Image (cartoon, grey):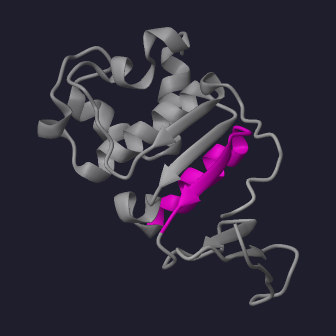
Amino acid sequence: MWNSGRGRIVRPGLDAILFLPERPYLPPGTIRDVLVPTERGDSGDAEIARVLHALGLETVLERAGGLDVERDWDDVLSLAEQHMLSVARVVLAAPRFAFLERPRTAVGSEHVGRILSLLTERSITYLTLGDGGDAVDDYDAVLELAGDGPWTWKSIDAAPRGAAQRAEGS
């Protein structure tokens, strides 16, 4: 059997972390309800408009009829638009950490740089989960986890392409 070892795992509180799945769920309601849940406080209309503009979602707001019109988002928005609206929710909530599941699959490569730049600009640390086919240009480092235990850490900005540290084990 394995020796369990010793240690301590520390993580931020749940209010400091948001998860953005590959397939977002937007409940029926208003854009304001989707973007600013009541337990997270209140973002003003100007701030909401700035974030929507930064993500290229102005037409979504127009098609919805404004911030306070009830809609069923599956009927109004494409899957990519729903995902981008979920990104806007993360930006407005301003957590310390955001976990993004396969963002390139959800919105396409052309939008990922915009999303990651906005998260960086807002001092939101992000971790993206992908399948290995993603371009690494938008990242500081890449951690590859093999199913049988080994892992590889590649520092993108500090090392030449292809340089990696390899470790075996858990």
Is 115 magenta? The answer is yes
Residue 153 coordinates in the image, percent (x, y): 75, 73
Q: In this rendered view, identify the residue nearer to me: 81 or 141.
A: 141
Outermost residue toward the front in this view: 1
Q: Is residue 11 left or right of residue 46?
A: right
Residue 93 horizontal/vertical position (percent): 57, 25
Location of residue 73 (image quadrant): top left
Please, is residue 60 above or below residue 31 in the view?
below
64 or 38, which is in the foreground?
38
Magenta run includes residue 112: yes
Decide if residue 57 is in sight here. no
Q: Quadrant of the C terminus?
A: bottom right
Looking at this view, name the residue that lies furthest to the left: 75
Residue closer to the observer: 166 or 61: 166
**20 relative position to 27: left or right:** right
Task: Answer above or below: position of 134 versus 34.
Answer: below
Q: How many marks?
A: 0
| Coordinates of residue 39 in the picture (x, y in percent) | 49, 10
Q: Name above or below for residue 85 compared with residue 112.
A: above
The quadrant of the image that shows the N terminus is bottom right
45 with respect to 5 (left or right): left
Residue 160: % across, % down: 83, 87
Tell me, yes or no, if residue 161 can be seen here: yes
- Looking at the image, which residue is at 41% across and 38% down? 86
Q: Please determine whether, in this image, residue 130 is positioned above or below residue 56.
A: below
Q: Residue at x 33, y 42 (%)?
A: 24
> What range is drawn magenta here?
110-130
Q: Residue at x 74, y 68 (%)?
A: 141
97 or 6, which lies in front?
6
Question: Which residue occupies 64% across, 53% down?
Answer: 117
